[in-house]
Amino acid sequence: KVAVFLLFANGALTIGIAIAAFPVFRAYSYSMALWFLAFSIVWFSMQAVDNIHILSMLSLSQQYTQGGASNPELFAALATAVRSTRRWAHYTELLVIDAWFFVFYISLFRFALVPRALAGFGMIMVIVHTTGITLPVLAGYSSVLVMAYSMTLSYLALGTWLVVKGFNEGHRPLRAEAHEVELDRG
């Protein structure tokens, strides 16, 4: 139950990150800022669904230990259904998480808020994660678990950069210029 609470907190943290980044991203593109915030809200919602499934698995296992051993076939069938449902919810959530990170990295790249090589590396690591973990499972294949750690490298690199240097906002367009650029881009 503590892990579920921490997963909720992590989902809420992404909304906090999007709110904190909103004014910075909005200075460059209002629509990108909104997309980033929207993916944060979807991430939190998907985390809630995943958490429901985790708690359902916990409840089922508790029911089994409290007398379910008298009908093990029923509990085995229920366990298979609950585990399968949780798996689909979890991998759908991972797809949303990958989308959130991709929008984040593409915003950093597009607006040059960090070195483009760093943001590009992050985008590549998200693609590696998505193609190695999320998409194979959703397509009915096994994932390549070693690819789960790909985004960790980009987290460490970007996190270190942001702690030491922060966003490169020195070239931020004026609000009127940003609006004109947004209108020009359609």
Image (cartoon, grey):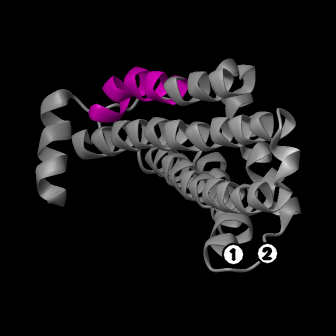
What's under tag 1, amino acid-wise?
Pro
**Which one is earlier in the sequence, the residue at label 2 or at label 1?**
1
Quarter of the image for residue 30 reads top left
Q: Is residue 11 above or below residue 76?
A: above
Q: From which residue to which does the magenta span run?
A: 13-27
Residue at (12, 32) in percent of width and height: 176
**Secondary structure character of the magenta stretch overall:** helix
Residue at (48, 41) in percent of width and height: 43
What's under tag 2, amino acid-wise?
Ser
Instruction: Give the side of residue 33 with respect to residue 111, left or right.
Output: left
Quarter of the image for residue 25 reads top left
Contact? badges 2 and 1 (CB < 8 Å): yes
Q: Is residue 5 above or below residue 80?
A: above
Q: Which residue is mark 1?
A: 136
10 Å neighbourhood of mark 2: few (<14), some, or many (≥20)? few
The label shown at residue 142 is 2
Residue at (20, 38) in percent of width and height: 178
Residue 31 location in percent, x, y? 24, 45
Confirm whether the magenta stretch covers residue 26. yes
Confirm whether the magenta stretch covers residue 167. no
Residue 57 location in percent, x, y? 71, 43
